[in-house]
Image: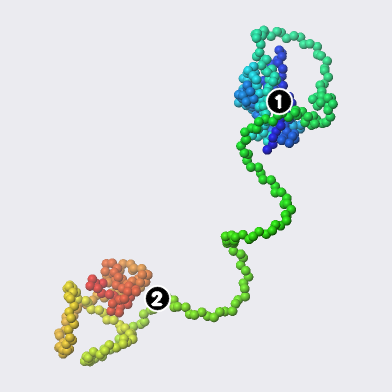
Amino acid sequence: MHKTTLLTLIALAIALTSFGQAPEAFKYQAVVRDAGGVILTNQAVGYQLTILQGSPSGTAVYTETFSPTTNGYGLVNLEIGTGTTTDDFTLIDWANGPFYMETAADVTGGTSYVIMGTSQLISVPYALYAKTSGSSTPGPQGPAGNDGVDGTDGNDGLSAYEVWIGLGNTGTETDFINSLTGPQGPAGNDGIDGATGPQGIQGPQGLPGNDGIDGVDGLDGATGPMGPQGPQGLPGADGIDGVDGLDGATGPMGPQGPQGLPGADGIDGVDGLDGATGPMGPQGPQGLPGTDGIDGVDGLDGATGPMGPQGPQGLPGADGIDGVDGLDGAPGPAGTNGTNGVSVNWLGSFATAPVSPSINDGYYNSTVGISYIWNGAWNIIAQDGTAPSSGSNANTLLYTVDGF
């Protein structure tokens, strides 16, 4: 952080006379240096000037700020009373002193002001008091007098630098400005530490130092925990195929696969002629089941008589001894012929139900695998995958006690 040294060169007020009015300001000039004493030239700086009443830590009666730029010699020229402020410079009661001026600056041109010092105003701004001083009421202004004869122009005055050279000093104007620094005053009491500023930008990395002499190797430390697995490396080149190993033992048989779709039904063979029935011989031992023969063509089922109500089941009795088969009785008289069944008008196979069917019309729905008959509504008579009775197939009409 820069530390600024402020050197007051001139602080003067325009003298009041009976012929004019003093301006509400007085001049202030200073040289701005950094902490190393280097003059800061052509640089924007921030100033805050405060006039204190009564003591160096007295009441602030006026505060103003400036944002000047130093010239080529590091000088700033200010007019106290004309800066940016919310106070009124004309309300200062210069007769009720003493007054002090506190100077604060920000060499970066901002508003983070650092107090540089406080000095007493000895006499310069008190000329402003003269405009209201006096114990008598002034008389009316007299008429203007005649202009006097112009006097002879005076010789040009010497500049401060020329006066300095005339005193026997040598050097440039910069040397002259540098020489204006007064003797260093006694060190003031340490102020309260300011708030820690923000961390500065990290400087560039320094050059690496020379390698030191290698020290003696220390004892091996304990093995640290395993680090996380690194990313998978690129796959290596394929190696040469090895010799095939011996075939392993056959594994256990896997579970049985799902049942395949049923095959198409074969064509039914023609039934042979029934032979004459011989006398029934004694029942022999049950033989092994023979191979199923080809189903003959099924005849039409007769009408089923009405079923009587089922009685309650009795307790099973003990099996009696089989008696000797009696002689066959004489054939009974032939029963009355049953009522002829109703035939089905088979329409065929369709993906959807036929439109405008008639009673006893039947069809096979190939979309759902079901056979239907119409008796005012479509009723199921057979269904694929359901075992039909009496060897019927998907196109066979099933007769129930409720009719078709």
Q: Is residue 207 above or below residue 382?
A: above
Query: Which residue sits at x=63%, y=18%?
Result: 96
Q: Is residue 37 left or right of residue 133?
A: right
Which quadrant of the rendered structure holds the C terminus?
A: bottom left
x and y percentages locating residue 113 in the rendered image: 65, 32
User: What residue is disc 2 on?
Assistant: 259
Marked residue nearer the N-terminal end (1 or 2): 1
Q: Residue at x 70, y 33 (%)?
A: 4
The type of residue carrying mark 1 is Tyr
Q: Nearer the viewer, residue 402 or 36?
A: 36
Give x and y (percent) for residue 217.
67, 59
What residue sits 38% from the left and 77% below the top? 262
On the image, which quarter does residue 132 sit in?
top right
**Figure quadrant of the N terminus:** top right
Across and down, in percent, residue 44 comes to: 70, 34
User: Label 1's element?
Assistant: strand
**Side of 206 where 168 appears, left or right:** right
- Residue 336 picture quarter: bottom left
Residue drawn at x 82%, y 24% as measured from the top left: 163
Q: Which mark is residue 28?
A: 1
Instruction: State the separation of the CA atoms marked 1 and 2.
Output: 112 Å
Q: Could you tell whether 379 is left or right of 15 in the image?
A: left
Residue 330 picture location, percent across and down: 15, 88
